[in-house]
Image (spheres, helix red, strand yellow):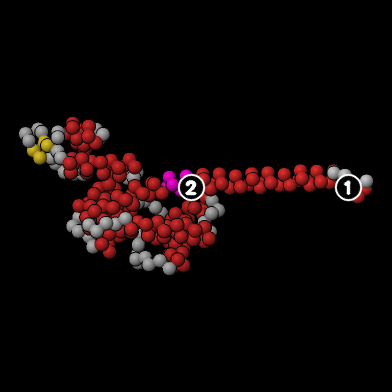
Amino acid sequence: MRLSELSAETGVSTASLKYYLRESLLRPGETITRTQAEYGPAHVDRVRLIRALVESGGLSLARVRSVLDALDSPTVPRTELLGVAQEALTEGTDFDEDPDWTAAAAAFIEHRGWRIQDGDVLLPQLGAQLKALTETCDVGTTATLDGWADAAERIAATDLETLTGDDAQALRTAIVGTVLSDRVLQTLRRLAQQNRTAMLFAARAGAAQGEGALSETTRAGAAAPDDSDQ
């Protein structure tokens, strides 16, 4: 297919496709003439991947490049798959590191008994996030963090179960799946919050109705004549 057909197939403008080609995010097509090239299924797949990472994953093109470089790298040992994925996804992430909060994050990780590499950039990143959370709202207690960490452990176990036997596909799943599922998890959290809120208010409303009915029954009993007085 020609560039215009690749655009129609993927829903990405020809201007964007030309930019991807100039920036080497998309491999050149097979040259047909001096000014035309032919593109195939692999190009469709790559363009859809870039679009998903940008639009659904919320990544900048600079971070998309990091993801694509990781995907195009030689085979990665399975034991390092998620490490490569996390490195690609955290590269270029901006935050203000605070040594005290990094230490607090490390202490929490030790409290959880998690095995984390020394010097992992996620520790100062977690510290910066905890600092911002604590400074703006009163929810950053250890009990709350433990609840979130419990949920994170279950999610991580599910993530590992999705990795296939093929190393290349497993790497793609580890990286792309993490990017896109992060957004899914955010949405599911909000939906779950709505559900829990609805359940809570329904329970309170039911309890209030029950108390009202009990009060009416009590008042009716008090107003009824006593047969022993007749």
Q: Nearer the viewer, mark 1 or mark 2?
A: 1
Quarter where residue 73 is shown:
bottom left
Main SS category, magenta section: helix
The residue sitting at the left extreme is 33
Could one spot residue 157 in this view of the protein? Answer: yes
Q: In the image, what residue type sits under mark 2? A: Ala
Towards the viewer: 19 or 170: 170
Task: Please tell me whether residue 87 is drawn above or below residue 8 in the rendered image.
Answer: below
Q: Is residue 86 visible?
A: no
For the point 54% across and 51% down, which residue is it? 137
Which residue in the protein does label 2 denote?
Answer: 192
**Kind of element beneath mark 1:** loop
Which residue is pictured at 26% across the width and 50% down the height? Answer: 67
Left or right, 183 with respect to 49, comes to right
- Residue for point 56% across, 46% down: 199
* Label 1, label 2: how far apart the Cα atoms are: 53 Å
User: Dot 2: within a 10 Å radius of its alpha carbon, few (fewer than 14), some, or many (20 or more) residues?
Assistant: few
Which dot marks residue 226? 1
Q: Secondary structure at mark 2?
A: helix
Q: Measured from the top left, where is residue 101 in percent x and y?
A: 46, 60
Q: Quadrant of residue 24?
A: top left
**118 left or right of 38?**
right
Tell me the quarter of the image containing the N terminus.
top left
Instruction: Assess whether residue 189 is covered by the magenta stretch.
Output: yes
Circle 1: residue type: Asp
Boundaries of the magenta span: 186-191
Quarter of the rendering containing residue 76: bottom left
Q: How many marks?
A: 2
Indicate whether residue 206 is drawn in magenta. no
Write the residue at 39% across / 46% down.
Answer: 184
